[in-house]
Image: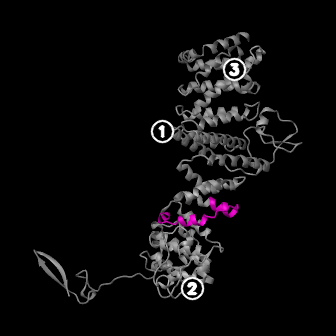
Amino acid sequence: MASLSSKTKKQKSEKPLLPKTKKLKREKRSLSDLKTLGEQLLTSRAHINNLPILLTFITPDSPPQYALESLLSLQSFFTPILPQLPSSTSSACANPDADPEFIYRTWLRSKFDDFLQCLVDLVVSSQPEDALREVVLDTIMEFVKVGNAGKFHSAIYHKLLRAIVHSELGADDILLDLLATKYFSYTDICYFTFISLEKQARTLEGEDRNLTPDFEDSIQSRLSMELSIQKMHNLLSHIPPMEASEEKLKMWNALGIFVEKSNKKEHIDLEDKQGKSQKSNDKVLSSRGIAKRMKQKFTKAWISFLRLPLPLNVYKEVLVTLHQAVIPYLSNPIMLSDFLTRSYDIGGVVSVMALSSLYILMTQHGLEYPDFYNKLYALLEPSIFMAKHRAKFFQLLDSCLKSSLLPAYLAAAFCKKLSRLALFVPPSGALVIIALVHNLLQRHPSINCLVHREGGTGTTTGTSDEEKDSFDNAEDGSVNRDLFEKAGVDHFNNEESDPKNTNSMRSSLWEIDTLRHHYCPPVSRFVLSLENDLAVRGKTAEIVVKDFSSGSYATIFNDEIRRRVKQVPLAFYKATPTCLFSESEFPGWTFKFEDVNGIEETTGTT
């Protein structure tokens, strides 16, 4: 053993020449030689020097057969002795005068660390074949299972995830899919995935604050950070939701990590558990306790991730799935309020996508957001009727305006804004608007004055004193009574962003009346049904907006084709017509033919 120690020191002193020597040795060996070296290593300690030779073949540029043969031999060698090896920290401060057996195991530990680093470099490289990378991933996960004295080795797993996140691999690399499909069904792996991603999110957040002012370096760092964020989101979004059913819990490590002290009834921290052996009086947590701990780590991981500068594509993907895949599993969903309110204030399509999650926080978790309806009113633009997520938006808009406690001026502002938009949007949008206006008029009788005003198109002098008093109460006494003297003038301010100052209560829904003459038959028919429903208000149910929110030109056309029509307008001729227009269609006109330069033209005179 003493000779081994001196030999190790000599190798360390000649470290700069080692790569070149190893490369020469690797070129001279064949696949059968590697197999022989592996068999010798497994049979006798006398061939322990075969270990460094096998390590030289586990590189991304090695032939796949050579790398695989070396990997299998070293895995078979390290797996049974790994629980007996000292930790890396104790190996670093080993005493040269210590027991030779301890020095030997310390040296093996250093070689195992080298082996593990080679595996990580190999699995995050895009050079090897996908099949080889899958074998390497399985090998690393086997060491994760038993590498910590037979228990889950979180340090190895954290090293793997950190290498994946900070590598140059794309966000859609097969390695991420392999990790998710093969290992994310195990509860303990998901648990440590949350812990690792939370740490890396905090690290990236610190790096974002410390970006160099140099333009080129800043762009390169930003691109690298965006790629890391995309991969983190890929990992987080592929972790399945936690199930409280005990029979569905699967553990990668048989000893488990979820234990509690039976005498103190307290949870053991993972950091303490890694350095201490589990006592015999410890017991496994119940499924409810496991679910609680998983929810805490899930919450910390997602909150830390959402603090990062998300790329636009990741930002949109997060907002789309947040209300279904994240909020129900958070320990405290209100922690998302800052992220969602910032997203909602951005405007445009980002605000539309944040609306679902923000609505859940307001209605189910008591979030107070005073500017919610002002921001919602600002989203009503013609472009929203062409947005990708318009169907969900219109359904949420209908739900947000359902409360009977809404002020009359607010309901009238939304009703009037939607009616004005009906003049600019496609027919599918007009159908949605009619449905929304129908529901608003059904829910809020206080805005019935918008339906009919006598004497003009807009507000008129025919408004009663009682309606004027209601206007004063609805808009805090800000009504200018001189406006009532102007008949046929629409006082609605379509450019105003504050619903309270739009003068909507002094207007009328003349835009809806114009839709009776819309060029698209389904729109004109729908307006007539609206008039009938308003006549028998007590017997009419609300319209389901979902039935119209996904409409388009194609759906309208298909519905018209399937529609059975009893009467169809046709033109019959008793004789074949000789001209395009007959004289009876133009009274007072006489048509005659004139020959100009050999060309016959038809002219008409009165």
Residue 309 shown left or right of residue 594 in the figure: right
Residue name at image x 50 percent, y 75 percent: 492
Residue 445 lies, with reference to residue 414, above or below; the image says below
Query: Compared with residue 126, is residue 45 higher up or lower down, i.e. above or below?
Result: above
Task: Pinpoint residue 97: horizontal percent, then vertical percent.
Answer: 77, 13
| Distance from the alpha carbon under mark 2 to that under mark 3 | 91 Å
Residue tagged by mark 3? Answer: 42
Which residue is the site of mark 1? 215
Q: In the rendered image, which quarter is residue 445 located in?
A: bottom right
Locate residue 94 relative to residue 394 in the image: left or right: right
Task: Tell me the SS state at disc 2.
Answer: helix
User: Is residue 417 visible from the viewing direction of this image?
Assistant: yes
Where is residue 151 shown, x and y percent of the image?
76, 34
Q: Main secondary structure of the magenta part?
A: helix
Q: How many marks?
A: 3
**Residue 574 place in picture, x, y as percent:** 29, 86
Task: Specify the segment rendered in magenta.
Answer: 357-385
What residue do we see at 53% from left, 18% from top? 27
* Residue 50 picture location, percent across and down: 64, 17
